[in-house]
Structure formats: structure tokens, C-alpha cells
Image (cartoon, rainbow, N blue to C red):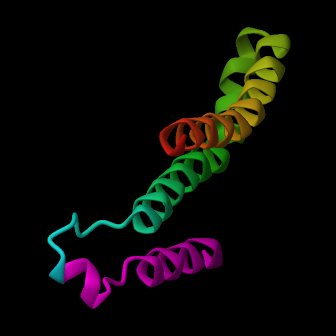
Amino acid sequence: MPGAASMIGMVLCASEWTRDDLEDGRDHLSENRKAAIAAALILIGFGVVAYLMPRIMLAIGEYSPWAAGTFAALFVLAFFGVFWLRARAQKKKRD
């Protein structure tokens, strides 16, 4: 799974501590590292659901094809919605 390998590499690169971070007594998890970890977890979670999406849709489709289509549409909206909400929270945090 090449996407997972690149995501792990991105998190590891973002997680490097600088000497200043260690000397000034701040939290060792910098804001960039926290953001990278959060993004990785969100992408992994959505990736697992996307991988299982055909099975989920077939199971829901036995009940109702409309419900299966609605589930797929909500999944796509949720993917973008999570990142939109996270951006809003970070913007409020900075202001």
C-alpha cells in the first residue's frame, strides 16, 4: 500500500524534534507533528472505510439501494467535512 508508506514517512519527518524544543521545556509534540498525526489517523480511518465500501454498500443495498447511495454520498461529504472542521478549529485556536 504505497499511500500508507508515504503517510508514515510524512509523519516521521514531521515528528523530528529540534534542540530548541527540548531545551525550552515546551511540549515535545510540536503543532506540526500533532497536525501530521491527526491527518494520518483521519486518512487511515477513511482509507479503511473506503477499502470496505463495496461490502458495506452491498450489505446496505440489500435493504435499500437508496440507502446505499446515501451512505456513499455521506462518506464523501464526511471526508471533506472532517478536514473543513479541523481547519476551522485551528483558525479559531490561532485567533
Q: Is residue 69 left or right of residue 36?
A: right
Image quadrant in which the N terminus is located: bottom right
State whether the magenta stretch is mostly helix, strand or loop. helix
Hey, which quadrant is residue 68 in on the image?
Answer: top right
Q: Nearer the viewer, residue 3 or 63?
A: 3
Q: Reply above or below: 54 against 59.
A: below
Q: Is residue 81 left or right of residue 36?
A: right
Residue in the image at 19% along x and 81% along y = 22
Q: How many marks?
A: 0
Q: Position of residue 92 (x, y in %)?
A: 55, 35
Q: Is residue 71 magenta?
A: no
Q: Is residue 81 left or right of residue 40?
A: right
Q: In the rendered structure, which segment of residues is drawn in magenta?
A: 1-22
Q: Position of residue 60 (x, y in %)?
A: 69, 19
Q: Nearer the viewer, residue 76 or 82?
A: 82
Q: Reply above or below: 57 against 6.
A: above
Residue in the image at 73% along x and 16% along y = 62
Outermost residue toward the bottom?
19
Residue in the image at 46% along x and 54% along y = 38
Residue in the image at 54% along x and 56% along y = 39
